[in-house]
Image: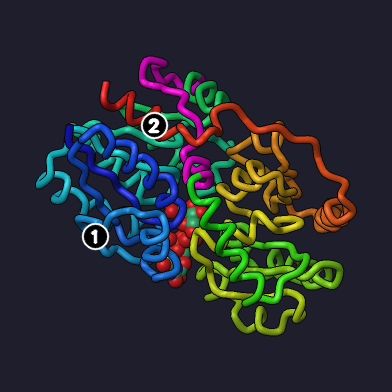
Amino acid sequence: MHVLHVVGARPNFMKAAPVHRGLAGHGHIQTLVHTGQHYDVQMSDVFFKQLGIPKPDENLNVGSASHAQQTAAIMSRFEPVALAHRPDMVLVYGDVNSTVAAALVCSKLGIRVAHVEAGLRSFDRSMPEETNRMLTDQLADLLFTPSRDGDENLAREGIAKEKVFLVGNVMIDTLIRLLPAADEAFTRLKNELSLQDFGLITLHRPSNVDEEAVFLPMLEMLDRLSGDLPLIFPVHPRTRNKWSARLERSNPNLRVIDPLGYVEFLALQKNARVVITDSGGIQEESTYLGIPCLTLRENTERPITVTMGTNVLIGRDLGLLRKHFCAALNGDRKQHILPPLWDGRAAIRIAEILSR
Ligand code: UD1
């Protein structure tokens, strides 16, 4: 079978890596297309290297633009590539613009599409990713879900259950594989950054970082909290582009640094006292690692991280953020258990299903 993978943005890479490895074990022909949605070395190349993903066969070099322009550019540049390769199956990952754009092209060309990380829903249509998730799932021929709530969401949207396979969480496959590398990296980072106790922050959602009235009070609270625990803030380019001048004036205990590679970020996450984030993937990784996660969002498409894991939804309530931050520092931790099928074998299940 000829399988073509489409990846484009940072959170795609750690999902595609284990599936590519799993399929290689079955001897399939594989083609890798990078849309170029993310293009900075620290947002893309570093991940390919650390995750052991082969160099892309094709790069569409779409770069940044408005949603419509970016999605349209991916579609028009991907169509001839899909026609030239004529794969038996295209695999798309997660919920970024590259995911929905490639799925739509394949659907129109009659090329079968499989969606890895299907069925997740935040039920918040103001999130661009929610549109991407819903449309991709409608277009996909095979849907691989990470957790039971995904299957339930798809059933509610009328997707035939024969197309849906509960396989577990591919991102956790990557995490488990690279934990030893992260432990090694931590020894180095600890010295480089003179780390003792620390917390870790990531913020890049448009709903948090685009508007001054939302972002600045958040940053002021983080400045204050860093008085109790030094905080490390690897800044996404979206956030950096908008707020570089303000970020430079932060409290010195709030350490603003460039985005990190996968292994370095995992190293910091594993050793942090608390993580504050608006990312999707980090809610899951911190649950696996048992690190308290305070999510600055009103909702999550990954509810299992709240019901079973270490995640707490803070929304924009900065008083609540302070309360849970202090609780984490006092060792007052939420009870948590590992969600089912977060066992490092999700991609192996996908490869077996595709091979059948
Ligand atoms: C995208 C995904 C989001 C994901 C995030 C992870 C969509 C709709 N959003 O958001 O779901 O959580 O990736 O990072 O697909 N930029 C750079 N260098 C890069 C990439 C981006 O400087 O390599 C800057 C550009 O100014 C760009 C901005 O970041 O306009 C936003 O990039 P974009 O890919 O549009 O969305 P993200 O916010 O990264």
Going from N to C along the chain, the mark reached first, 1 or 2, is 1
* Horizontal and vertical percent position of residue 325: 82, 56
Q: Mark 1 Cα within 10 Å, few/some/many (few <14, many 20+)?
A: some
Q: Quadrant of residue 208?
A: bottom right
What residue sits 60% from the left and 59% below the top?
A: 267
Question: Could you tell me the amino acid type at mark 1?
Answer: Leu
Inspect the magenta stretch and tell me whether residue 174 lies in it. yes
Q: CA distance from mark 1 to mark 2?
A: 28 Å
Q: Which residues fall within the magenta stretch?
A: 156-176
Identify the image quadrant of the N terminus.
top left
Q: Residue drawn 45% across and 39% down?
A: 133
From the top left corner, tell me how far across and down residue 119 is, in percent: 48, 31
Q: Secondary structure at mark 1?
A: loop
- Whether the magenta-drawn stretch holds residue 180 is answered as no
Q: Which residue is mark 1?
A: 60
The relative height of residue 354 versus residue 188 in the rendered view (above or below) is above
Q: Secondary structure at mark 2?
A: helix
Q: Is residue 329 above or below residue 113?
A: below
Q: Circle 2 sits on which residue?
A: 348
Marks 1 and 2 in Cβ contact (< 8 Å): no
